């Protein structure tokens, strides 16, 4: 993100490329919609890690990292050594945990934005999380200087997809919309190829607007 590209840069460039100076609102909305379209896709720039702390006698980690979309790996730090936690379904957790088992957790389940641990932690433990994160700096009401990896690493992808949305829904030009869909798919495949071997797991290509 050190290259200086931001929300305002993309809006201005799209206006020039579309040869329209009266579509600022529509362009901003298309950019945000395009980010939402791809934000569940996995790229190296939307993977991260952090540490959360358990509370003794509380089975829930209610304060998970902001923007967490999915957990790739959870590890418990016990005496300086890390042990992986196994993910279970919430149904399994509720049927297994009667609240009487305490100790170092070895299972977890995700539910309603929180994490439930089993057994119930008997003390404070550090849980190391590796996960896919939602990048939230850019929204329709964001300032022109707002930026994140969607504005830099994935700029051609988001710009192409957003132009397709403007062509389709505002300019009613399905042919140009189809061409921009093709360009967005090319950029998507380029990013995936670049990230090959770097991400935790793959994702399914989306091709429809």
Image (tube, rainbow, N blue to C red):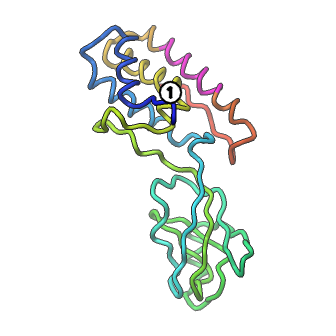
Question: Which residue is drawn at the image coordinates 75% and 40% (left, top)?
Answer: 197
Please give left or right for residue 30 compared with residue 129 in the image: left
Residue 29 counted in the magenta span = no
Q: Nearer the viewer, residue 158 or 7?
A: 7
Question: Which residue is drawn at the image coordinates 34% and 12% (left, top)?
Answer: 172
Snapshot quadrant of residue 34 = top left
Q: Main secondary structure of the magenta part?
A: helix
Q: Nearer the viewer, residue 170 or 191?
A: 191
> Which x, y percent locates residue 84?
72, 68
Disc 1 target residue: 155
Tell how many labels. 1
Q: Magenta segment range? A: 178-190
> Which x, y percent locates residue 51?
57, 66
> Which x, y percent locates residue 199?
68, 44
Q: Residue furthest left?
A: 22
Q: Secondary structure at mark 1?
A: helix
Question: Dot 1 surroundings within 10 Å: few (below 14), some, or many (20 or more)?
Answer: some
> Which x, y percent locates residue 171?
32, 12
Snapshot quadrant of residue 106 = bottom right
Snapshot quadrant of residue 75 = bottom right
Question: Which residue is drawn at the image coordinates 51% and 19% (left, top)?
Answer: 181
Q: Residue furthest bottom?
A: 100
The image shows residue 89, relative to residue 168, as above or below, that is below
Please give left or right for residue 200 compared with residue 176 in the image: right
């Amino acid at each position: 993100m050190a290259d200086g590209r931001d929300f305002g840069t993309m809006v201005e460039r799209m206006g020039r490329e579309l040869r329209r100076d009266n579509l600022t609102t529509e362009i901003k909305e298309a950019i945000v919609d395009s980010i939402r379209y791809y934000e569940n896709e996995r790229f190296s720039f939307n993977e991260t890690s952090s540490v959360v702390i358990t509370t003794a006698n509380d089975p829930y980690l209610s304060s998970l990292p902001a923007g967490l979309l999915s957990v790739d790996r959870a590890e418990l730090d016990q005496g300086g050594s890390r042990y992986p936690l196994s993910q279970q379904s919430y149904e399994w957790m509720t049927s297994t945990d009667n609240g009487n088992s305490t100790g170092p957790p070895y299972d977890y389940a995700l539910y309603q934005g929180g994490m439930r641990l089993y057994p119930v932690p008997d003390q404070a433990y550090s849980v190391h999380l590796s996960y896919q994160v939602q990048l939230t700096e850019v929204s329709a009401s964001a300032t022109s200087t707002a930026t994140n990896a969607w504005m830099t690493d994935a700029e051609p992808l988001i710009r192409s997809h957003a132009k397709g949305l403007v062509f389709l829904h505002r300019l009613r030009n399905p042919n140009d919309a189809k061409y921009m869909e093709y360009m967005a798919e090319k950029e998507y495949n380029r990013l995936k190829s670049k990230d090959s071997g770097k991400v935790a797991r793959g994702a399914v290509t989306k091709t429809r607007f």
